[in-house]
Structure formats: structure tokens, C-alpha cells
Amino acid sequence: MLILLAVSWISLYLNDRAKVTKLSPKDCLALHNLNDLISCLDAFTVSPSFYDSVSYAAAQPTEEENTAWTSVVSSMLDVNANDCSSIKLPSVLEHFYVVTTFSDADSTRSFCILSETTTSINQNYTKGWGSMIVPASAKQISRRLHLSAPHPQADINTPQQAGAIFVLSGAHSLLVSGRFRSAYAMETDCIVPTQPRKGYFKTDPTHDINEPFSIANRAIRDWQNANDGCPSETCAYVQFHGKAAASCAADTMFISSGLGNSNSSLSWYRDPSLDIPARRLRDVARTVFPTWNVTIPPDDPDCALTATSNVFGRLINGVPESNVCMTEANTLTATGEFIHIEQAIVSRQSNVYDQWGEVFKRTFRTSCTEGTVEDSETGICKES
């Protein structure tokens, strides 16, 4: 009865956020479908211009909380028990975060969910650090893919899209920010704009290193580097974004690796001696979506959505962590491990999720753990 009531609340909430005042993010965990869960949690995203300087400071992690946040993110990646019992949530986080075992009815697989449980004014998350999802067992990981949605609500449907691809491809992790990019409408001092009125906000995690989403991304990368690195055949860090119709209007999907449109960068993308995941992804996407215009920078050198100012992209591409606010990546240190996907709205619709799953399964081969093999029909690892 309680579960039915929670589901009823959730249904009402998703139709009209203002009408439901008693719903908690914890109620989302009563759902039975992972994408419904992601949509439910997405509704608590800290809204635009919500913070002032005082409330923003209160929502940011303290040094102790920051250490705990990094620790639990790393622990999530180490999970190897079907009930998520091996994940240790530090006590300092217990008042507003929880780790839950979630059974997805659609895939019949179990996942570990790290999610916030509390809200403040107008159903906004109290902290807004984000949510993380991993398979509940290492045997369910088919590819060392780390997917993320940095701009919930601003980039419509990207958390849901990333969640669907996460399941369909057998990825290792999914990270979703808990704040609208302008939740604190104060310009970051990390990335200084080169043009007037092109500044970025402190709560935009792609342009500020102090955002909890950014901290979690660095922890994920550190974990992967300590566990056999990120081979281009099986591993990548993928961010899903949404572009306005007028931005790079000819492109349905614009894929980049964090390098710009200079001649050297365009040559890097074209270099046949390099195995560049973004280029492979483009090639496969063109076969799966033959009516779409799927491009990388050499195909549309006038498109500026190249993620050169993305702080995580810079880090992955060899810029020292202490310099990511000031220094762009270059072709001498670029790894190709970072994939930045800008998309028209048609690319983010639920009716193409299955095709997206095929794109990722064909782009990245499996890396099944001991005791599992790839299922030739599904492209997902299964117990042997």
C-alpha cells in the first residue's frame, strides 16, 4: 500500500511539481524502472538562480564531506556484491545521502544507487551534489564506460538518455548532476570567458572544479587509472549534452574530444594511425542513424561546440589538474578518452534509445570479467 501511495505521489509530482509538497527523493526509490527513477530524481534538481552566496556556501561540501564524497564514489566503482553491501557510506553523509539496491524491472538487473534523500525550499535538493548509479555486481559490467549528464533540465532529457544507454551498453557508471547549471548565477573564476557575456556559472560542473559533480568525475578517473587505465577499445568518459536548434544547426549530433578547430586539432581527428573513440562513435552512429547528420570537428569546422573549456575534458586530455582552469588541451597530450556529445532534441528522445544502445555496443567492445562471456545476441556480458 505504501509503495502504491509513493508511486501515486510520484505520478502527480511529475505532472505538476508545485502541487506536491510531501514527496521526498526517497520515494523515487520505490519505483521499478531505472529510467523512471532517474526522471523522478531529476525533478529535485536545484533550480535556476536558487542560491545566493550564503545558501551556495552552505550547500557546498566541507573538507570532511569532500573526502567522504570522493570515498563513496570510489567505493561505488568497487562494488562486487549483488546487494551493494560492500559500499561504505561515510557517516558524515548519512544525513542526506543513501546507497540503495535497486532492481530494474525492464532489464531484470540490479543497480546500486547513490542519491540524495533530503530537500529544502520548493522541493530543491538540500545539497544538489548529484546521483551515481553502478551495476550491483562486477559481472554485470560489459564495458568500462563512464557516462554522465552534467546539465540536467537545461539539456533536456540527457539524464534519461544517458541512463538508457548506461543499461543497454552495460556501462560501468552513470553520474548525473543535481544542480541546474545556473543554480548559483554567479560567474565562476575557473574558466574566464574570451568573449563578453559568455561567462560560465559556479554551478556549471563542466566549467568549475569545485562542483561536487566535478569532484566525483575526478574520483572516477582516478579509480579507472588505478584499475588498468582506460583502453580506447573498451573505455571512455562520455558526457551527454543538448544543443539549441540554432547552434551548429546543420548537425543532428556533434561529437568531439575536447580539442578545438585549429589545423593541428582537425588533423588529429583525421589521423588514421590514432584509434579515436569519438571518430568510431561517429562512424557507427552514421550507420545506425542514416538520416541524421553526425559530425566531428573536421566535418563541421565552423561548429564551436568543441568542449575546449570543459575542465574534465582538459584533465583527461593531459592538462595537469592544477592548470585545468587556465590551459586548453592540445594534440600532444590528447588521449581521446573523453567524448563530448552535443545533440539536437530529436537525438534525445526515448524512441531512439535502443538505437543508441546499439551505437555504443558497436563502438566499444566488451571487457567481460572472469566468469562471464559476451552474449552474441545482446552484446552484453553474461555468466559463463
Image (cartoon, helix red, strand yellow):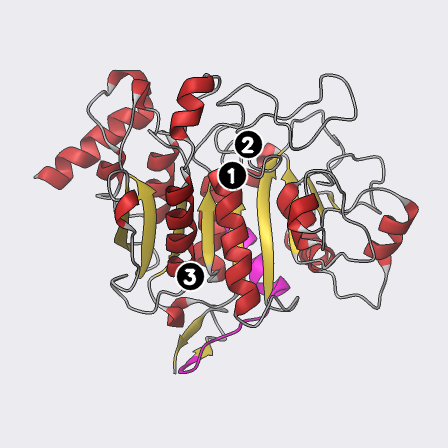
Q: Amino acid at mark 3?
A: Leu
**Distance from Cα at disc 3 to Cα at disc 1:** 22 Å
Q: Which residues are magenta?
A: 351-372
**How much space separates mark 2 and mark 1, taking CA atoms?**
6 Å
Label 1: few (<14), some (14–19) or many (≥20) C-alpha neighbours in 10 Å:
many
Quadrant of the rendered structure where residue 303 is?
top right
Measured as percent of width and height from the top left, residue 118 is found at 27, 32
> In the image shown, does 230 or 243 lie closer to the viewer?
230
Question: How busy is the neighbourhood of tag 3: few (under 14 within 10 Å), some, or many (20 plus)?
Answer: many
Reading the image, the residue beneath label 1 is 158
Tell whether 214 sits left or right of 163: right
Which quadrant is home to the C terminus? bottom left
Q: Quadrant where the N terminus lies?
A: top left
The residue that disc 2 covers is: 155
Is residue 51 shown above or below 280? above
Would residue 104 be counted in the magenta stretch? no
Instruction: Give how far across and how far down residue 368 sits, in percent.
Output: 48, 75
Find disc 3 in the rendering and name its residue.
77
- Closer to the chain start, of discs 3 and 1, is 3
